[in-house]
Image (spheres, grey):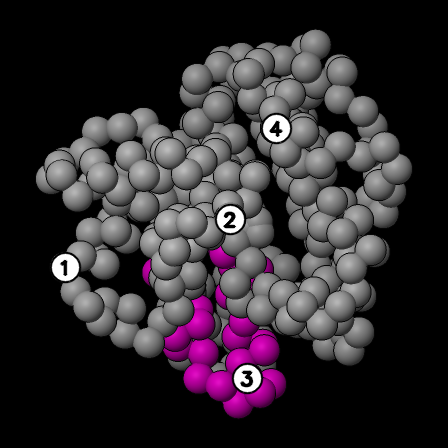
């Protein structure tokens, strides 16, 4: 059910206008969230956290590998939070803590119970699958649809990439949705999802773009358009604020790309075809 309980007239009115392709005077995502989060209701804060928990996902995996890893500042959990939550999960069979999202607990329990639970799937992809499944259960229509759109978009891009390079896509497709399962097995021209995902033909066409940066630009344009269409009738709601933050996240990514065009950035772009959790997600 769409959350319409709180309207943020002053907050939304005070947000600077932003346009795709323009980054002058743009705040960082961290700066924006630091300003916005204290003004949200507890329920809406939970929605915002869910959308941007992909930073916590990466931070959590890095923490499990090395407790001294540098954490992305866009995460909601700092090192002391992770220290406490891991200790809690170790000591309590049914830990209760609002900082601990259920899919994180599920992933951590699997790491303790089964050495080979990943079965060849990369940890980030496995955790992403749990994250998407959790997001798809949201009662907020916008959040639910955003997770579904990103899951289908990223999985279709992954299937296209795997077919092009003759890679078995089974272990790279994330989630357990109908479209996810079709993409794992279909050999059809439209990957079997032409009638299930309305953006199928558009994604197949943009995936043919040979220039990596231009292809990423077209993917972000599709996401931006989706956000515009799905918040058209939202004026001062949490949905409008979340969409704004997601747009700022995209603009900051391109701002970074304009300054850093090294090999590491290009590797990140390639891997994002199957790993991006930006909702990025």
Position in image of residue 194 (x %, y %): 56, 68
Crowding near the residue tagged with mark 3, few <14, some 14–19, many ≥20 C-alpha atoms within 10 Å: some
- Residue ID for mark 3: 163
Confirm or deny contact between disc 1 and disc 3 (CB under 8 A): no
Mark 3 or mark 2: name the one nearer the start of the chain.
2
What span is in magenta?
151-178
- Residue 90 % position (x, y): 17, 43
Q: Which of marks 4 and 2 is in front?
A: 2
Label 2 secondary element: loop
From where the camera sits, is residue 195 visible? no
Please tell me whether the stretch drawn in magenta is mainly helix, strand or loop: helix
Q: Residue furthest bottom?
A: 166
Q: Is residue 78 left or right of residue 6?
A: left
- Which residue: 72% across, 62% down? 216
Among the two numbered marks 4 and 1 on one chain, the one whose residue lies closer to the N terminus: 4
Q: Residue 70 carries which label?
A: 2
Check the image and name the residue furthest to the top: 10
**Which of the two marks, 1 or 3, is nearer to us in this view?**
1
Q: Residue 33 carries which label?
A: 4
Q: Distance between the residues labelled 3 and 4?
A: 39 Å
> In front: mark 3 or mark 2?
2
Dot 1 corresponds to which residue?
A: 113
Q: Nearer the viewer, residue 196 or 106?
A: 106
Identify the element where label 3 is drawn.
helix
């Amino acid at each position: 059910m769409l959350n319409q309980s709180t309207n943020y007239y002053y907050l939304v009115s005070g947000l600077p206008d932003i346009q795709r392709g323009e980054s002058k005077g743009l705040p960082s995502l961290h700066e924006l969230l630091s300003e916005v989060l204290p003004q949200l209701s507890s329920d809406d804060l939970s929605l915002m956290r869910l959308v941007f928990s992909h930073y916590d996902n990466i931070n959590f995996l890095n923490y499990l590998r090395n407790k001294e890893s540098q954490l992305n500042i866009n995460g909601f959990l700092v090192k002391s939070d992770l220290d406490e939550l891991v200790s809690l999960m170790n000591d309590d069979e049914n830990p209760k803590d609002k900082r601990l999202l259920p899919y994180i607990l599920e992933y951590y329990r699997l790491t303790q119970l089964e050495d080979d639970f990943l079965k060849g799937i990369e940890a980030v992809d496995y955790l992403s699958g749990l994250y998407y499944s959790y997001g798809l259960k949201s009662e907020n229509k916008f959040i639910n649809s955003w997770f579904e759109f990103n899951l289908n978009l990223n999985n279709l891009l992954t299937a296209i990439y795997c077919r092009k390079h003759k890679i078995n896509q089974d272990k790279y497709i994330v989630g357990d949705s109908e479209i996810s399962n079709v993409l794992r097995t279909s050999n059809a021209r439209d990957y079997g999802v032409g009638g299930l995902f309305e953006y199928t033909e558009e994604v197949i066409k943009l995936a043919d773009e040979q220039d990596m940066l231009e292809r990423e630009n077209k993917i972000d344009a599709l996401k931006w358009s989706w956000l515009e269409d799905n918040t058209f009738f939202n004026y001062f709601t949490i949905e409008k604020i979340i969409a704004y933050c997601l747009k700022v996240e995209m603009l900051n990514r391109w701002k970074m790309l304009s300054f850093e065009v090294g090999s590491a950035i290009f590797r990140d772009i390639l891997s994002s075809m199957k790993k991006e959790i930006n909702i990025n997600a």
